[in-house]
Amino acid sequence: MAEPTELLALARMFGDTVLERWERLVSLETPSADAGRAAVFGKELAAGLAATADRIEHPSGPGGDHLVAYWNGRGTPSPSPSPDGGSRTGHTLLVAHSDTVFEAGTIARRPFTLDEDGDTVTGPGVFDMKGSLVAVELAMDLLSRTGAAPRRPVRLVVVNDEEIGSPDGARLVARHAEGAHAVLGLEPPLPGGALKIGRRGVARIRLSVRGVSAHAGLDAALGVSAIDELVDQLASLRATAASLPDAALNVGTITGGTRANVVADHAQAEIGLRYATPETEQALLKAVLEPTPVRERAALSTRTLSHRPAWAMDPANPLAAELVALAGTLGLELPLGSSGGAGDTNLTGALGIPTVDGLGPAGAGAHGEDEHASLSSLLERAALLAAFLESH
């Protein structure tokens, strides 16, 4: 059995190797929905994991191949309590993603760089979330080098479409969440390195309106303006969102009509929703998905483009308590908090599976020009992950 402090000391010996690997993964750009680049990255990631993994799969999806890696563990673990009063004896699920929000070619303008402080790494995707993938590789390597192994079977799911709502990756996460003892999300942490024990849910809905065209000057009364109907619908939805606790509504795009002298016969808007609790989620989705026309001859339709359920924060999260205690043995502090953004762990948290997210290395600037992450934090998170998998 490897002691946590032994794992941390060993991790700190691999700073240069980690930097090389980090740079390699960042240099292989992975914008969402780019199947070709996803395939190249998947092969590179699999090559790094193959040294320790017992099996690696590449499930296909519309945006290219995802990746699932398996480690067998030491054997069948003894049952441990679950929130429903039963017991969980299943695997530990690690959830990550390979895609970034950056277009191909960004790396040429903002190359991977280690700052003069010897700790801060910059570049597209270093924080969200390729540093986390390096941390997983290192964690499994630490266990192997110390003659240790995960206590339970481990599965790592890396989807390639998280940044666009996991339209396909969500089904992969759901499949591998079945029977899981615990879920560890490898997304970046909150400011200060805090773990996420709750996430607001999000949804993207397209609201379409069909009206009746007519001459705007001669026969305006014969027409039904789809644009006017859409504006009224959006105003009503804004009022609904404002009346609900912890709800937000953003109109992202609006299109419609043809020209100024024609009553518009079509219009649509893409609406972004955010909600912190299942109750608010239900009320907000009902309002958006079941609209009532203001105009008698207007026809409304909706389409859900993506949906992630609310994962309500539980301050007494027992899995988080275990991680905080384990971090303490390494001399590390792990604050806890809730995220205003959504991710793949929204699903597992909402299902009641013990879930903690934000186990990636500390940093800031996700999705922006100033994205950066900490090398020392990556080494610490790798040691913490290895220690947890070995003992839990």
Image (cartoon, grey):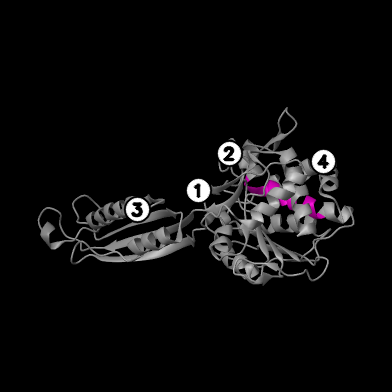
Identify the residue under disc 2: 365
Identify the residue under disc 3: 241
Name the mark nearer the viewer: 1 or 2: 1
Q: Secondary structure at mark 4?
A: helix
Apparent side of residue 270 relative to residue 75 in the rendered image (left or right): left
Q: Are marks 2 and 3 in contact (CB under 8 Å)?
A: no
| Quarter of image, res 90 | bottom right
Q: Are marks 4 and 1 in contact (CB under 8 Å)?
A: no
* Amino acid residing under circle 3: Ala
Residue 365 higher or lower than 89, as above or below: above
Apparent side of residue 2 relative to residue 133 in the rendered image (left or right): right
Q: Are marks 2 and 4 in contact (CB under 8 Å)?
A: no
How many residues crowd mark 1 within 10 Å: few (<14), some (14–19), many (20+)?
some
Quadrant including the N terminus: bottom right
- Residue 277 position, x and y percent, is 45, 57
Q: Secondary structure at mark 1?
A: loop
What is the distance, in whole Å, between disc 3 and disc 1 at their CAs? Answer: 16 Å
First-in-chain label (4 vs 1): 4
Residue 187 higher or lower than 149, as above or below: above
Identify the residue under disc 1: 340
What is the distance, in whole Å, between disc 1 and disc 2 at their CAs? Answer: 15 Å
Q: Nearer the viewer, residue 77 or 7?
A: 77
Q: Which residues are magenta?
A: 128-140
